Amino acid sequence: MDFLSQIPAGGTVFNSLAVFFGGTIGLLVGKFIPERLHKAIFDCLGLFTLYVGINMTLQMKHSIAVLLSFVIGTVIGDLCGLDNKLNNLGDVLKAKFHSSNSKFTQGFVTATLLFCVGSMAIIGAFEDGLRHNASILVTKGVMDGISSILFAGSFGIGVIFSIIPMFIYQASLTFLAVWAAPFITQDMYADISGLGGLMIVGISLNLLKVANLKLCDMLPSLILIVPLSMLFALI
């Protein structure tokens, strides 16, 4: 995978292609999977996602900083209507491409959150930008590709369109990596991972239909955690 280091945001390009091909496979074989098997698979995905989220959450170093960023970020997201805007984007794409799939927007939003939230997306993008090392995003791409097969089989083509926000998000982080490098410490990475873990736990609860959380509104927390983690490291 050394050739990816020669491509700007090469890790994100690989990640996007993995989701595209995985989603395409899911569209082709999904209709042959019985509904009861879909549910069983999503129960497995939900439980495994819960494990991943809890494991990431335990890595946080400054729990109060994570809590404050989580609460304040969610308030900002709610006031900005981020959840509604992402859902509206899904509806716009559905209308533009004349999709009759009733689960288009749900698949788009669920896949976007799962592929964008978490330490692998953030740290992987930074590694790609700072060290031209795409290995983390390649690993993430393989995981996302497998997930997209299952998601597309259940939710349909909306899953593939999650590539758009994912590519913009990860590529932006990669291009900002050099600027941010002097300010990011290992403890900050740990707090980002912990916060991402909390959001992934939220995704698992939604997948298991235990809750219906507006996770998009929580995304500003991932920005706030950096200065708050830095502040609490000095206290």
Image: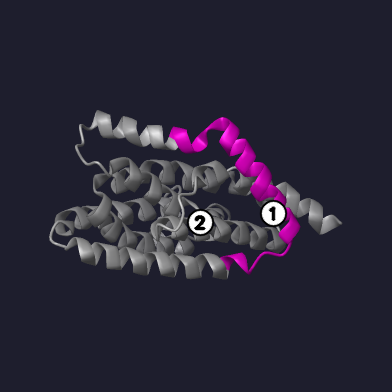
Q: Residue at x 22, y 66 (%)?
A: 37
Taking 220 as reference, is 148 left or right?
left
Report whether residue 132 is seen.
no
Mark 2: which amino acid? Gly
- Residue that numbered label 2 is attached to: 202
- Residue that numbered label 1 is attached to: 67
Query: What segment carries the magenta color?
Result: 56-85
| Image quadrant where residue 164 sits | top left
Frontmost residue, 159 versus 126: 159
Q: Distance between the residues labelled 1 and 2?
A: 15 Å
The location of residue 222, given as percent across then percent down, is: 61, 48
Q: Which residue is drawn at 30% across and 33% down?
A: 93
Frontmost residue, 140 versus 202: 202
Vertical relation: 9 (above or below) 58: above
Magenta segment includes 16: no
Magenta segment includes 68: yes
The location of residue 226, given as percent across then percent down, is: 69, 50
The location of residue 233, given as percent across then percent down, is: 80, 58
